[in-house]
Image: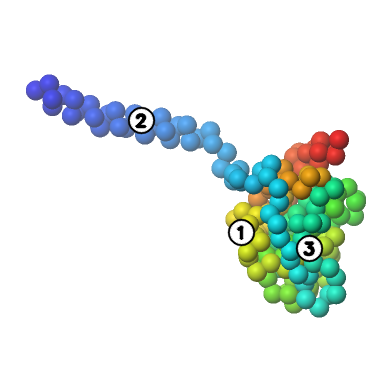
Amino acid sequence: MLRRGWLYLLPVALFALLAIGFYGGLETDTTVLPSALIDQPVPDFSLPPLAGGGEIGFSSGDLPGKVSLVNVFASWCAPCRAEHKVLNALAKSQRVPIYGINYKDRTEAARAWLAELGDPYIRIGADSGRVGIEWGVYGVPETFVVDRQGRIRYKHVGPLTQADLDRKILPLIAKLEK
C-alpha cells in the first residue's frame, strides 16, 4: 500500500518540477541570441567586392586599429531595408566606420539596392554564406561591434533602430574608444 502512495505523488512531483522550469523560463530574454564569438577575434576572412564596382573588397585585416561596425545585409531582406536609413544617418555623422557583408545576394540586386537607398559602407564584401557562418550569423540583418584589437564585442540581431544605437551601440563604442 505504501508503494501505491508514492506512485500517486509521482505525477504531482513531475508537474511541480515542470511548473518551476517554465516559471524560470519566463525571466529569460528571448531577444538575446548568445554568441560564442563575443570577446573573440573576428574570423579570418577575405571577401571580394561586389562585382562590377571596381572597389576593394572587405577582409578581417581591415578591422584592427579602430572601433567599427560590421553589418550583414541583403537586398532581399525586408528588415535590412527598414534599418538602412539608420545606417545611412550613422555613416553621415562619421561617428564610426561601417563595413558591410552582403550575404547570399545577387550582385546586380545588391548594387541596385545600394543605388536606391544609399551606401553607408566603407567597404563591402560579397559573401556566398561561408563567412556568415564563421561569424555565427543566424540571418540578416545582424550587426557586430568590433573593437580596436579586432575582437567582436557585441552582436545585434535584427534591424537596428535609432533607439538601439542610442541605448546600446553608441555607448559601447564610446567606452571602447577610451
Question: What amino acid does circle 2 point to?
Answer: Leu
Question: Does the rendering let one see residue 51?
Answer: yes
Q: Position of residue 76 (x, y in %)?
A: 67, 68
| SS state under label 2 | helix
Residue 51 in the figure: left or right of residue 78: right
Question: What amino acid does circle 1 point to?
Answer: Ile
Q: Earlier in the sequence, mark 1 or mark 3?
A: 3
Residue beneath label 2, please? 17
Q: Position of residue 158 (x, y in %)?
A: 66, 52
Question: What amino acid does circle 3 point to?
Answer: Phe
Question: Does the rendering let one see residue 83?
Answer: no
Q: Position of residue 34 (x, y in %)?
A: 59, 44
- Which residue lies most toward the left here? 1
Residue beneath label 3, please? 58
Residue beneath label 1, please? 133
For the N terminus, give its image quadrant: top left
- Specify the quadrant of the image occupied by residue 71: bottom right
How far apart, in angstroms, are the residues tagged by discs 1 and 3? 16 Å
| Total residue callouts | 3
Decide: is 132 above or below 20. below
Instruction: Tell me whether circle 1 and circle 3 mark residues in contact (CB < 8 Å).
Output: no
| SS state under label 1 | helix
Q: Position of residue 51 (x, y in %)?
A: 78, 76
**Which residue does the image show at 73% across and 46% down from the upper left?**
151
How far apart, in angstroms, are the residues tagged by discs 2 and 3? 51 Å
Q: Earlier in the sequence, mark 2 or mark 3?
A: 2
| SS state under label 3 | strand
